[in-house]
Image (cartoon, rainbow, N blue to C red):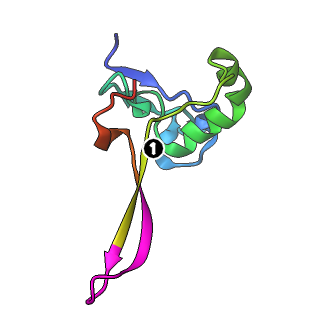
Amino acid sequence: MSSHVWCHGPYCHTHQTLDRVRGSQGSKVLRTRKIKQWRDDSLYNWFCSMHCYNEFANKYVQQIVRIAPRTEPLTTPCQIREHSNIDYYGKPYKTKSVLINAEHLGVDNE
């Protein structure tokens, strides 16, 4: 794999910033930014900014959803525990529910 790729933002080449200007006097153009490849799992390997990422997502959201449609809800195991505060005389005066999620239960979510 090359150490650089072009930004995948569909309108990256239209953003008017000086670092995108290329060409000689009289024939200047705005060009898509080149991005250095860092890690495989980072969106910044493919987009120069969150703005370009959001433009891509908004333009191609239907195709993205067709690739991996969600037909069932995701779930995470959890527990609810009641916690009571006790006053000076030993009587409970305030009870609150505490949600304990999978990370605190030692459950692997994947």
Q: Is residue 9 above or below residue 65?
A: below
Q: Residue at x 48, y 42 (%)?
A: 49
* Residue 9 location (% of width, % of height): 58, 32
Disc 1: CA contacts within 10 A as few (<14), some (14-19) or many (>=20): few
In depth, the one of 44 and 92 nearer the eye is 92
Q: Residue at x 36, y 71 (%)?
A: 84
* Residue 45 location (% of width, % of height): 40, 28
In depth, the one of 93 and 53 nearer the eye is 93
Magenta span: 85-98
> Which residue type does callout 1 highlight?
Asp
In depth, the one of 62 and 98 nearer the eye is 98
* Residue 93 location (% of width, % of height): 40, 81
How many labels were placed on the picture? 1
Residue tagged by mark 1? 19
Q: Is residue 42 left or right of residue 104?
A: right
Can you say which quadrant of the picture contains the C terminus?
A: top left
